[in-house]
Amino acid sequence: MSRSGFKVRAGQAEFERGVLLHRIAGLLARRQYGKTTIASRIAMRKMMLIPGHTVVFGSVKLDLGREIVRKEGEAMRQAIASLAEAAGDDVLLSVVDGTTGKDTAKLKADDFSELYEAQRLEFRLYHSKSIYSRTKVVALTTASVGETGDLILDEVGRVKNFREVWEAVSPIIASNPDFRCVLTTTPPPDDAHYSYELLAPPIGIELPINPQGNWYKSDQGVWILRISAWDAAANGVPLYDDDTGSPITPDESRARSHDKEAWDRNYGVIFRLGGTAAVGVLQLDSAQRRGVGKCACVVVDDDLDFDRAIAFLKEHIGSGQAGIGFDVATTEKEQSNPSSITVMERSGIEVVGVVTIVWKTADPAIAKARVRQVVQTVNSRPEGGRARRLAIDASNETYFATEVQTELCGLIPVELVKGGETVELPGQEPITKKALLGSRLVAVFDDNQITVAPERYIKSDMRLVRRDRGSFACEAGPNGEHGDTFDSHKLALWALSSTNGAMESAEGIRMGGRATNAPRFVPRVLHGRARA
């Protein structure tokens, strides 16, 4: 306990210990447990340890209401002041205006909070008259967290575009082995938020009640200390009744809550599935587990990578019906979208994404040569015959897609798929090709009938795709990823079933490699709209 009477909770002390062991560490704790307080103490300790050191404290709460901002600023001030007080007379702590450098020791609480709100607040710990360490408070955005030093990222589960923020701060951590990064949050409301992927516990892990909380390592390799309401209660930190203010157990608190899903996130510290992501976490995890040793995703940096992908395809393609989907991009800028091509094979009622190849190139000749080699590799397999169809996204790169169609039509039927075209299905409202193909891919994930490559690239890229007003939208990844593997898989799935432009025998239509006499609706596109 410090001279000011601040008592460190068991979970807070455990997290301080863990930060010394792990360069990147996350604290997932129930609301009002003191995440900001302990983060402030960690910042103060680092300032005391290293002369001239900078700690960047990125707060999402600077984007919230004024009262929340002021409360957060005061909590931070008290936490740092209490540790400085405990350190004694050897520590000189100054609170300054980060723009002017002016000492604000005589400022009132409101003035202090105004500095915090204006992102001009700095805590300076002087090691001599000319040397000081500092903690600088900034808004948690890509533009604000550019300085080097230790990073404390507060409430990351509420940060907009957190994937981009993490991409921006990762090089800072990598630049110096002495730098540390601390992340604090409760689970995000949407499982499509990048903090879910970065911080969620491995599926099936057991975390017993523990006054100190429980450590685990996320699938992304980040060490996390989780402190739920039950863990806090075991340490004597209760919740309180909204009406009487009497202490109540976590079970009583949850029973009285009208929004139990929100309670589970904010107090149970539980990562709930659900949200806007098109492909669910469990469905994708199951599909990728089946793909171990059977499927591959190769990101091509040079010809050797492409040769490796072709070698894998030769070895693992079977004798089932095969379809190829190609999502086109003809540029190689850092933030531009990559091309993605997927070879998919039907196996009974299931489909297998045997290989997905991703590349960036501004040379159309290279792109066409690679697509040709993929088609030829499938066509030359010992059993199963040629690929059924190549489906190309022609929504944006129409001219290039048409060139590919012209050059490869002698090897394989090539269908140009324009996402904006409207399809009319019996008994349903008109739907765009983009929505139709995306929904079919999501359906095979939901029905547990697809196997995909186990690489992290596939998981990250597919999880960028979100449901949006009956269709699909996508946020860009840090290197231009834009759900391109999702698109190449949906096109490959379409290539396995589409009969657009194809003749059908009177005896039956091929479905899954078998003939059936059941009637089948085949949409036909005329002038941008499909007609029955």
Image (cartoon, helix red, strand yellow):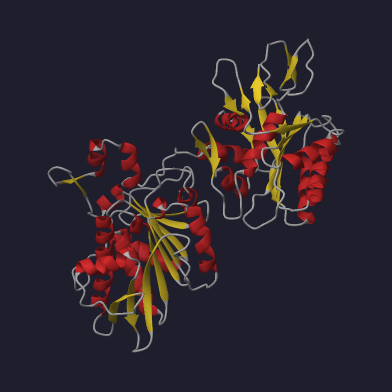
Quadrant in the picture for residue 431: top right
- State the residue lying farthest toward the front: 527
Q: Residue at x 29, y 51 (%)?
A: 31
In the displayed structure, would residue 234 be above or below residue 494? below
Give the percent coordinates (x, y) of residue 186. 37, 50
Quarter of the image that includes the N terminus: bottom left
Give the percent coordinates (x, y) of residue 483. 60, 43
Tell me if 396 is positioned left or right of 203 in this view: right
In the displayed structure, would residue 413 be above or below residue 249? above
In the displayed structure, would residue 399 be above or below residue 159? above
Q: Residue at x 18, y 68 (%)?
A: 5
Q: Residue at x 33, y 65 (%)?
A: 118
Q: Nearer the viewer, residue 500 or 306?
A: 500
Tell me if 356 is positioned left or right of 364 in this view: left
In the displayed structure, would residue 531 be above or below residue 306? above
- State the residue lying farthest toward the left: 244
Quadrant in the picture for residue 110: bottom left
Q: Nearer the viewer, residue 529 or 64?
A: 529
Give the percent coordinates (x, y) of residue 250. 25, 44
Quadrant in the picture for residue 150: bottom left
Tell me if 104 is positioned left or right of 475 in this view: left
- State the residue lying farthest toward the bottom: 129
Quarter of the image that includes the C terminus: top right
Camera sees residue 13: no
Tell me if 272 is positioned left or right of 114 in this view: right
Q: How many marks?
A: 0
Give the percent coordinates (x, y) of residue 505. 79, 13
Camera sees residue 296: yes
